[in-house]
Image: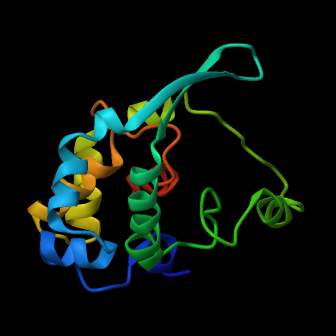
Amino acid sequence: MPVFFMQPNYSANPIGSPSALAATLGVSVAVLNDFASTSASKYSKFELAKADGKPRFISSPNHDLKIIQKRINRFVFGNVIYPDYLFGGIEGRDYVKNARVHANAKSLITLDIKNFYPSIREEYVFKIFKHFCKFPDSVANLLTKLTTLDNCVPQGACTSSHLANLVFF
C-alpha cells in the first residue's frame, strides 16, 4: 500500500483567514476571538474513576464552546481522510469494527499511554493546523486556542480524539 494511504490527509483547501474560519464555523470573528481568549473559563472540570480506581480528570466544554468544537469537527476534521487502520473518534468507525478487522490476527498489541491527552501539548496542536491543514498562523492560532486548555488537549472535548489521531503524523 502506498505511504500516502497509510497516513491521514487533509483534503480541502486551507481556510485562509480568521474571517473565513468564522464564516466556516457560522460565527463572527469577535465570537471566535472571545472564545479563544477566554476558553479556560468555558470548561467545567471533574473526576471520574478509572477501572483501577485512580482518578481520570475530565474537562468538559460549556454548551457554546462545545457547539464551536463540533463545527470544527465537521468543517475541519471532516475534511481529513483517515487511513483504514484508524478507528478512535472517527465517524462511522467504532470498537466493533475495529475488533472485526483484528479478529484473525496472529498477534495483537494493546497499550494505554499514560496521561495521553495532557501529553499532547499546545505547540503540537498548532503544528497540526499549520503544517497538516496548511492554515496560516492566524487561523492555526485561533483553532489551537479553541481546542486546547492549560496548554494541552483536554480530555472531554469532542475535538481531542481527532487531534490525538493526527498528532502522530
> Residue placed at 20% from the left, 68% from the top?
28
66 displayed left or right of 55:
left
Q: Residue furthest right?
A: 104
Residue 149 horizontal/vertical position (percent): 33, 36
Considering only vertical position in the picture, is 41 above or below 23? above
131 displayed left or right of 6:
left
136 and 102: which is toward the camera:
136
Residue 14 horizontal/vertical position (percent): 23, 79
113 and 59: which is toward the camera:
59
Considering only vertical position in the picture, is 42 above or below 5? above
Residue 130 horizontal/vertical position (percent): 20, 63
Residue 138 horizontal/vertical position (percent): 10, 62
60 and 13: which is toward the camera:
60
The C terminus: image quadrant:
bottom left
Is residue 80 visible in the rendered image? The answer is no
> Residue placed at 50% from the left, 79% from the top?
5
> Residue placed at 60% from the left, 63% from the top?
86
The N terminus: image quadrant:
bottom right
Considering only vertical position in the picture, is 119 above or below 153? above
Residue 3: name its quadrant. bottom left
The colour scheme of the drawn protein is: rainbow
Is residue 136 visible in the rendered image? The answer is yes
> Residue placed at 32% from the left, 75% from the top?
26
Question: How many labels, in total?
Answer: 0
72 and 130: which is toward the camera:
72
Residue 104: name its quadrant. bottom right
